[in-house]
Image: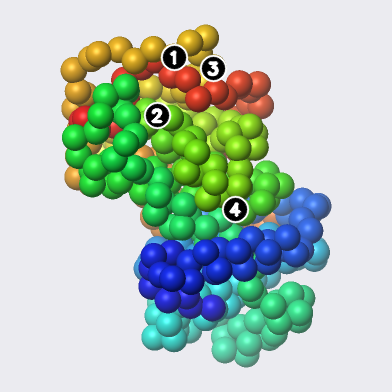
Amino acid sequence: MELEDQWWKGQLAADIYQALRYKELKLPSYKGQSPQINLRRYFADLIAIVSNRFRLCTAARHLAVYLLDLFMDRYDVTVQQLHMVSLSCLLLASKFEEREDRVPKLETLNSLGCMSSMNLVLTKQGLLHMELLLLETFQWNLYLPTAAHFIEYYLSIAVHEGDLHDGWPMTCLEKTKLYMAKYADYFLEVSLQDHVFLCFAPSLVSAACVATSRLILHLSPTWPPRLQRLTGYTWDNLVPCAEKLLIAHDSDVKEANKQKCQQPGQQQQQQQQGQTVYHGSGQTATAAQYLHRPSVQYPQQAPQPGLAPNHRPASYLSHSTAGLQAPNGNTQTISASQDQKSSIPNRAYQVSMHYTCAAPCFDR
């Protein structure tokens, strides 16, 4: 279903939001019991790469990954078939969320470089058969809200002129909104990378993305009453999900800083070998800096340098086909930089709304 552009600003915004919240109560259950669950990250990245190539909307990408998760949870599918399933999920999601002229065409899909590297050729009959199987699996119901369906509604009031940055009034509201949108989009993509986020309601994941973005940007209060009223979630409701998002952020920042510290010759050598090299933003903050603090203190420090215009908060947002390789048999092969979060330890972080360090992300 293609909603009207910027529906969250219209008169029906509250009604549409309530309809989405009601629908998410009836979402199919997810048990995480797929025999191929170790390959999920690879196929989620494949969907993201193809989605970015065709510039599909965020809702289409998230719906495609959600359809893939549900299908894998119910069927034992071979690796070769999972390629077809993944792309069929993306086609169905794009038909549901996008305009007809933006839906990827079969010929264009087959011409992609990643298709030849996977030795995969799609046929019209094969796609139709798989799409029919998917639709029958979901009983012809693709009205399945994801976190992406809620994010814009929450972002509409995520930043207010009365908010403080490191205890100081903001001097550039629009710039703050820009960084809020960037980080919210980043955390939204983080939630696609691990099936553990499926244990949370999509609206809660979306709210946690906004709350974590405010935490990273050092906006206070971290979870203001207006967002609590709009979302229906308290800060305590968001903490379990926010912890996982912060752990992923910690890992991405460390990886970005590690790549930045490498010698230029090593970076050039990696690029020649087909590995994706990510450039960090120069941030040295880690997730631990945004976690539990005994008291609230706002140091009066000089503004930190702003980000470059093309800044991307996370390493893996720079999807490219160079970093994606097709599985060989039953073995998954993905570039090391894309496997970072899969090895993140289960650290018992205690998230709170308190922080003491200056935000490294933008000037006041």
**Which mark is in front, 1 or 3?**
1
The spot of residue 174 in percent (x, y) is 23, 46
Residue ID at (52%, 58%): 150
Helix, strand or loop at disc 4?
helix
**Label located before the other in sequence (4 or 1):** 4
C-alpha gap between disc 4 and disc 1: 29 Å
Residue furthest to the top: 294
At label 2, which amino acid type do we have?
Answer: Ser
Q: Say which amino acid is labelled 4.
A: Ser
Quick one: label 1 or label 2, which is nearer the N terminus?
2
CA gap, disc 2 to disc 4?
A: 22 Å
> Residue visible at 52% across and 9% down?
294
Query: Dot 1: what SS?
Result: loop
User: Alpha carbon of mark 1 to alpha carbon of mark 3: how far?
Assistant: 10 Å
Q: Residue at position x 21%, y 30% from top? A: 364
Residue 296 tag number: 1
Q: Which mark's residue is nearer the viewer, 2 or 3?
A: 2
Mark 2, mark 4: which one is toward the viewer? 2
Residue 292, labelled with which disc?
3
The quarter of the rendered structure image containing the N terminus is bottom right
Left/right of residue 282 with respect to residue 289 in the rendered view: left
Label 4 environment density (alpha carbons within 10 Å; few <14, some 14–19, many ≥20): many
Find residue 220 and name its label: 2
Tag 1: residue type? Val
Query: Which comes before the other along the chain, label 3 or label 4?
Result: 4
- Image quadrant assignment for residue 69: bottom right
Instruction: Give the number of the mark in front: 4 or 1.
Output: 1
The span from disc 3 to disc 4 (Cα, nearest Å) is: 25 Å
**Residue at the image point whose x is 27% and y is 24% from the top:** 168
Label 2 crowding class (10 Å Cα cut-off): few <14, some 14-19, many 20+? many
Could you tell me if the residues under marks 1 and 2 are in contact, i.e. CB atoms within 8 Å?
A: yes
**Is there a contact, CB below 8 Å, between mark 2 and mark 3?**
no
